[in-house]
Amino acid sequence: MAQATQRSTVPAIRKDRRKAPWPIEFYRSAVGKKWVMALSGVMLMGFVVSHLIGNLKLYLGRNEVNLYSEALRDMPGHLLPRTLLLWVIRVGLMGAFAVHIHAAVTLTQTNHKARATKYQSPREYLAANYASRTMRYSGVIIIAYVIFHLSDLTFGSGPHNLRGDAYNNLIYSLQRPWAAAAYVIANLALGLHLTHGAWSMFQSLGVNNPRINAFRRHFARGFAALIVVGNLSFPIMVQLHVMEPTCSANRTPKAQVAPCARAIAETASKITAGK
Amino acid sequence: MSLSNMKLKVTVWRQAGPNAQGAFKDYDLDNISPEMSFLEMLDTLNEQLNDRGEEPIAFDHDCREGICGSCGVMIDGVPHGPERGTATCQLHMRKFQSGAHIKIEPFRASSFPINKDLSVDRSAFDRIIESGGYISAPTGTAPDANLIPIPKGVADVSMDAAQCIGCGACVAACPNGAAQLFTSAKIQHLNLMPQGQAERWDRTINMVDTMENFFGSCTNHGECEAACPKEISIDFIALMNRDFVKAQLKQRRLAGQVFP
Amino acid sequence: MTLESNIPEGAIADKWDNHKFNVKLVNPANKRKFTIIVVGTGLAGASAAASLAELGYDVKIVSFHDSPRRAHSIAAQGGINAAKNYKNDGDSVHRLFYDTVKGGDFRAREANVHRLAQVSVNIIDQCAAQGVPFAREYGGMLDNRSFGGAQVSRTFYARGQTGQQLLLGAYQAMMRVVGLGMAELYNRTEVLEVVVKDGVACGVVCRNLVSGEVFSLAGHAVVMATGGYGNAFYLSTNAMQSNVTAAWRAHKQGAYFANPCYTQIHPTCIPASDDFQSKLTLMSESLRNDGRIWVPKEANDTRPAAQIPEEDRDYYLERRYPAFGNLVPRDIASRAAKREVDNGRGVGPQKNGVFLDFGAAIDRLGEDVIRDRYDNLFEMYDRITDENPYKMPMRIYPAVHYTMGGLWVDYNLMSNLPGLYVLGEANFSDHGANRLGASALMQGLADGYFVLPYTIGDYLAPMLGKPVVTAADPAFKAAETKVGDLTKKMLSIKGKRSVDDIHRELGKVLWDNCGMGRTEATLTKAISEIPAIREEFWTNVKVLGSNESMNQSLERAGRVADFLEFGELMCRDALHRKESCGGHFREEYQTEDGEALRDDENFAYVGAWEWEGVGNDPTLHKEQLTFENVHLATRSYK
């Protein structure tokens, strides 16, 4: 019989790769990916909050909303060419979104490899909740909705869409019951995603301190609730006809060009006047 | 105080060897005393199997005091069974109702291959430790033990982490098959100590790297903490994540700034 | 063959230093040319493996566990002694030495014990440097407690898990050298034979417990750190897999087995609750610091503890030993409990325990203080018995816990077989007839970290450049065949009784006849009964399964087969030692008030037994013990 049998070795679940520069190396590690996910998540949370703040202007009327949407394009005043900063932010958000998704997909693949044979009897979860276990599904719903939402409003495929009249565009869009329903579902998914994500990010980023630990869960729930309640108010208000379009319902984009163009010009002049 | 004897039905995963096909098998048991530990219930079953010429069920166990970390199976879908903060060997049958149907499955993870029946190979944990889970203090090099005072609070938290028994329940519990709780407990036990500072950043990077060779990633379910027989906190995972990011930034050998 | 203890010359305090200077050294560049096989990865084995590999030796480590960290040292709760005198209460190396010799009832080798006390201080330094999270004072300094009846506070601890933390420290140091490629680890591998050629130990034959493959490891020296034999009794506080096999097979190859009758019975274990019980659980001895031990005054008093008024209780330790009270040494406390239970005053459903009552302590200190000190132990007790010790007294009873006997070794820790070293609980050397609390961890780490790395060079240095026996040698082939045949034989018996069933029978014979109290009659009875059980085993054992895969019944069968031979030796040793000392209590030899009666004139020696074949009387070799520094005296704890 052979001398020296080698000790048993369990094969690794990932391949050996050549050393890369440290940012890549960092992102290759799962802990690094989670850190990137948390950071991009924070950016996206920032977007969600500012989007909500902007949307709340719906309650102040059409003018405020349209002024707001113009102001976004004009950020930061005359320091940069018009829409440049907006595009920088958009690209940044898209980058964050893309990397958030990429990390999620690759980590999911790793995790499947880490347990190639599943449990053959039912699991009983003690701590993992519905939100944490459905992150990938709520995430997919959010992706799908964001694509629809952008094409509907930002790129203008929605009904009676008129560039510059964000207020009416949104109300026309949400008057369609199915669109309102999609909005509701997507925001519920977002709320679920945030309930876990806004807590999880603290752990991934290593933000752990006895003074704040108790607060982290509350923060996540509160944040998710704020977004869900705020965002859901819009389709509900529209469906209840509390919010109505300010232009006639059967406007066609062409017919409305003149008044709306005037509105835009007014807005622009107000902004330049520094109001 | 064995008042009444329990009747049980147990469904156990039987697998002849690492590469064999496994399947569940049902066994009926009566005369189980509520005073028995879970493993003594399996001993009793094994005696009966041996009597009737069926090979006994292989399962790992040793100290039966909840400290060696040898034992550990999935009991009704939970590592170490229904009682929190308790290893399989310290679980007693009085926690079950007579007539219960108990399903027993081995811990499952790609890097915990099954040896036989309920016994799994957890040597991947040893690979994680050998990649950095130590303080390099070769015998004879130590200064007087009281030369480095360690605040009581630090020693206590370090001990909270050091209690880990390496049973693998965290991996078994994790929906992602991740070993973050085990790895972070060891990293933080040493990283919190003044003696552990010299190797802190290398230790963190090397152990995380080795861990990721074998296990999945953490998505902060907290399932590991709930399953841990020593109730080790997932706070240590956050601390490990923080140290890992810091370590990435602290790789400054060229500038001669390798120290914390 | 005479036993050469190789104790160095000089005054007791200088012996170790002189010896370290006089031993031969192996040049650092030559160390890698020597292969050392370390069997067992508890405190002694892991610390030795790490230290030897750090020195540069080529180390091969064998552990039957799935991970070396699971060795049973991990279960030690209380603490580790060291003569640091951090408490400024008059401790010193000499006092630790004195206490250990006296506590061992004058049956230990003075020189070894003194060395142990000397290196104890280095152990704490070493462990602290490794990051062992010892308990600390608020100022950051190490905390100490008094333990096991010591008059000074010299015990270092890490909550109730000192053994775990010390073992993890040693394990991590060992895994470091494994990771660096300086040592090779064979886990789930059991040593089943020690290979001896021309009277020299030159390797081991192992079996891979997952694949069943039998293979050999050859080396210049074999270091055995395989623990004690307490599981011979079936029920003990030892881990289920703890066994005597490696040591016993070395014994059968010619190594002498010393003082096997010295077994320590620990007074504070949870009593067995039924016949199916697989093992006993120890509760830390520290409980006796605040708990009061009592039984009802009347036999067969079945009232619940709370309903037994103060005047019907007998606090028998406080009554009989007013000075030490509940803190008398382990052997005394154990025998006293046995006496009460034998007199029918036992408590609990099986009437097999005594009360350990915290009622008074809770009244005096408050529940919070008690919770702070013992909560993890109380919780463990509650989990096992479903009784809340805050509300009702615990029930405790003595159980086999530690074995002082073991393979005979000289001052260098080498057995009478050149090349075979024995460390930790597996050797006989430092505790005499009784081990003091918190000394086992100290001895295991002393042997591994600070003794063997010095002494092994003395043996290896002259072997440089000499031819070595390789695993291809016929001696290895023969040993492999022998191991394979034994396995096949056990599988082929196909009898009716399970391995555990036979083990339980042996355990009962040993416990009843060679347990806490022994007499000539019981020992003679056991010696006549054990061969029959052995015969039963070899004709009627039922081991199912095959040799080609994991087979836990087969593993246990091999171990029980060795216990069946070993148990007889233990009884023979107990029979021949016509005195009582420490963990060996012969009922014929006791004082009027029931204390152990030593016979220093006739028995102040180490009894080392030579194997003469199954069923044959072993040959006794004596190593006379001399006490020049601690004067022979009767222990008194009154």
Image (cartoon, rainbow, N blue to C red):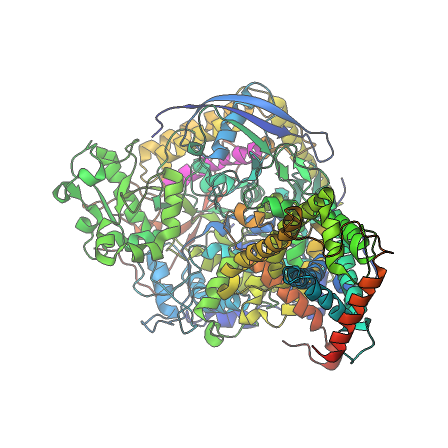
User: Would you identify the image quadrant in which residue C472 lies?
Assistant: top right
Q: Is residue B85 left or right of residue C434?
A: right
- Tell me where residue C262 appears, x and y as whole percent: 39, 46
Q: Nearer the viewer, residue C259 or B244?
A: B244
The region drawn magenta spans C556-574
Check the picture and name the quadrant holding the C terminus of chain C. Answer: bottom left
Specify the principal SS of the magenta part.
helix
Q: How many marks?
A: 0
Q: Is residue C569 magenta?
A: yes
Q: Is residue B145 above or below residue B31?
A: below
Q: Residue lying furthest left in this view?
A: C311
Pinpoint residue A251: horizontal percent, then vertical percent. Answer: 81, 52
Residue depicted at 57% across the width and 30% down the height: B103
C438 left or right of C534?
Answer: left
Task: Pick out the residue farthest to the right.
Answer: A254
Q: Is residue C542 left or right of residue B147?
A: right
Q: List x then y, in percent, for residue A143.
A: 75, 51
Residue C626 horizontal/vertical position (percent): 37, 60
Report the front residue among C600 and C13: C13
Instruction: Please state which of residues C144 and A163 is positioned toward the viewer in this rendering.
Output: A163
Q: Is residue C263 visible?
A: no
Place residue A177 in its image quadrant.
top right
Which quadrant of the view contains residue A217? bottom right
In-front residue for pair B126/C122: B126
Residue found 14% across the figure and 41% down from its top: C309
Q: Is residue C337 visible?
A: yes
B189 in magenta: no
